[in-house]
């Protein structure tokens, strides 16, 4: 799956679950540890693929490896959070 497609799907899922604010806080707080987390997931990937599809695991690892991709995910989430009040006013 293309990286931007994965980021958009992840942001949509987080938003639909109502976890936008906690996700942004978690991503901001753990941004310095994201690369380490991606490396740990790489080591655990063979075992992780028993529970999670390989493509999803690979997408998560590539998302955590790149600070730019994490920033893109946070921007997507912030954009969705800002648009929420506008959606309720229109209906």
Image: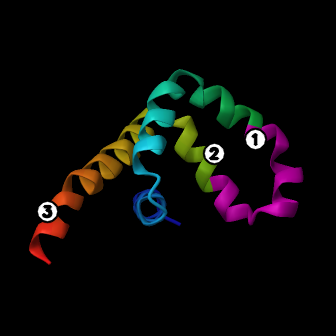
Q: Which residue is mark 2?
A: 61
Q: Mark 1 and mark 2 in contact? Answer it, CB < 8 Å.
A: yes
Quarter residue 50 falls in? bottom right
Position of residue 24 relative to residue 58, above or below, is above
Is residue 63 shown left or right of residue 86?
right
Q: Is residue 50 magenta?
A: yes
Which residue is under mark 3? 86
Q: Are marks 2 and 3 in contact (CB under 8 Å)?
A: no
Residue at mark 1: 42
- Relative image position of residue 13 (x, y in whole percent): 48, 64
Nearer the viewer's eye, disc 2 or disc 3? 3
**Which element carries disc 1, helix, strand or loop?**
helix
Is 49 on the left-hand or right-hand side of 55?
A: right
The magenta region covers: 41-58
User: How many residues crowd mark 3 within 10 Å: few (<14), some (14–19), many (20+)?
Assistant: few
Magenta: main secondary structure equals: helix
Q: Residue at x 40, y 44 (%)?
A: 21
């Amino acid at each position: 799956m293309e990286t931007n497609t994965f980021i958009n799907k992840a942001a949509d899922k987080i938003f639909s679950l109502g976890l936008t604010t906690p996700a942004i806080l978690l991503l901001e707080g753990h941004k310095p540890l994201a690369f380490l987390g991606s490396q740990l997931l790489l080591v655990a990937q063979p075992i992780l693929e028993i529970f999670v599809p390989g493509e999803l695991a690979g997408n998560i690892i590539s998302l955590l490896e790149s600070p730019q991709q994490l920033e893109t995910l946070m921007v997507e989430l912030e954009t969705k959070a800002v648009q929420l009040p506008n959606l309720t006013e229109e209906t």
